[in-house]
Image: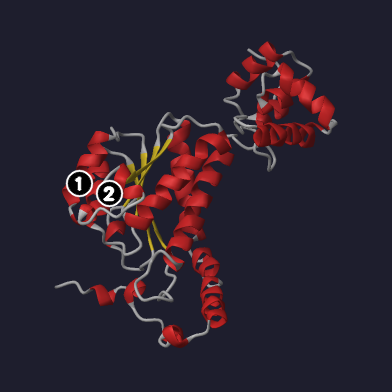
Amino acid sequence: MKFHLRDLTTETRNRNTEELDKFSTMEIVQIMNEEDKTVAFAVEKELASIAAAVDLIAECLENGGRLFYFGAGTSGRLGLLDAAECPPTFGTDPSLVQGVIAGGEKAIVRAVEGAEDVEQNGREDVIAYGVKAGDAVVGIAASGRTPYVIGALAEARGQQAKIISLSCNQEAQISQGADVAINVVVGPEVVTGSTRLKAATAQKMVLNMITTGCMVRLGKVYKNLMVNVQVTNEKLKERAKQIVAEATNVSADEADVLLNKADGDAKLAIVMQKTGLQAEEASRLLTQYKGNIRRILEGNHKPE
């Protein structure tokens, strides 16, 4: 049966905005705001699937695997953005979470026409990035039928990676054969077919949940504190000081002293203060507990 673009929810016309070009500026921003309010409710309907994806990906990462995002256009850029934020936020190696976009790096800032239309391009990128068994691959496509993403997921499945699909249509082609399928149906866009709007907002929300959930599971967060923050500028140095102070109930000056002893490592500074250990011993304890402060404090506090 021949496929028609108009069959997709993301491509149908929004009856609330049929006269959009007649709206005042205030009416335009009001209707966009009203439409955006519905996105969180659409995401809510998929929370069980999102949680399943987090559990699956976290297990892969904990056992030495990596997380890859494959997408085209806006979807690809959102994957790249989420991946790029993981090292500064959670102190991860850049190879742990990687975003791949159809058309390569030049497609980040400018559309590469036709790059998403060839399944083989997705297959070749999976091979080029060395996706293998034990890795987790998330295919992102608002339409749920982007050939590049279909090819990437098919090849990744062949390499025995775990497969998660993320789309904004209920009957998503990329969901076929996925270990976890996430289909956030946000409905027609304010501008017909412009999936950089509600669909992109939904995708960003889901990606936030995936990486944040995984990093919490992996001990990259203590309580709700960003303890793996990388101190690469003055703002982040102040943030690390505040994190140590909040986690240990010491003053800002005491936190600064602890950070200096820990060579700027907030997590190490916290463990030193909580256990009374010196930096070298506290570091061994972090290694023993895979960097998880909670497990250290609930354990026997003694390095092996």
Q: Is residue 284 left or right of residue 254?
A: left
Name the residue carrying label 1: 121
Q: Residue at x 52, y 51 (%)?
A: 208
Q: Amino acid at mark 2?
A: Ala
Q: Is residue 100 above or below residue 43?
A: above
Q: Which quadrant is the N terminus positioned in?
A: bottom left
Answer whether residue 243 is visible to the viewer in this image.
yes
Q: Is residue 68 left or right of residue 259?
A: left
Q: Is residue 3 left or right of residue 208?
A: left
- Spot occupied by residue 201 in the image (x, y as percentages of width and height): 48, 62
Do the residues under discs 2 and 1 have CB atoms within 8 angstroms? Answer: yes
Answer whether residue 273 is visible to the viewer in this image.
no
The picture quadrant where one finds residue 2 is: bottom left
Residue 10 marker: none
Name the secondary structure under disc 1.
Answer: helix
- Spot occupied by residue 18 in the image (x, y as percentages of width and height): 40, 86
Q: Is residue 99 above or below residue 6?
A: above
- In the image, 160 versus 196, the foreground residue is 196
Task: Give the alpha-carbon distance from disc 2 to disc 1, as whole Å.
Answer: 7 Å
Q: Is residue 104 above or below residue 292?
A: below
- Spot occupied by residue 26 in the image (x, y as percentages of width and height): 57, 80
Name the residue carrying label 2: 102
Q: Amino acid at mark 1?
A: Asn
Name the secondary structure under disc 2.
Answer: loop
Q: Which quadrant is the C terminus positioned in?
A: top right
Q: Residues within 10 Å of mark 1 (few under 14, many from 20)?
A: some
Q: Residue at x 40, y 35 (%)?
A: 66
Q: Residue at x 44, y 83 (%)?
A: 20
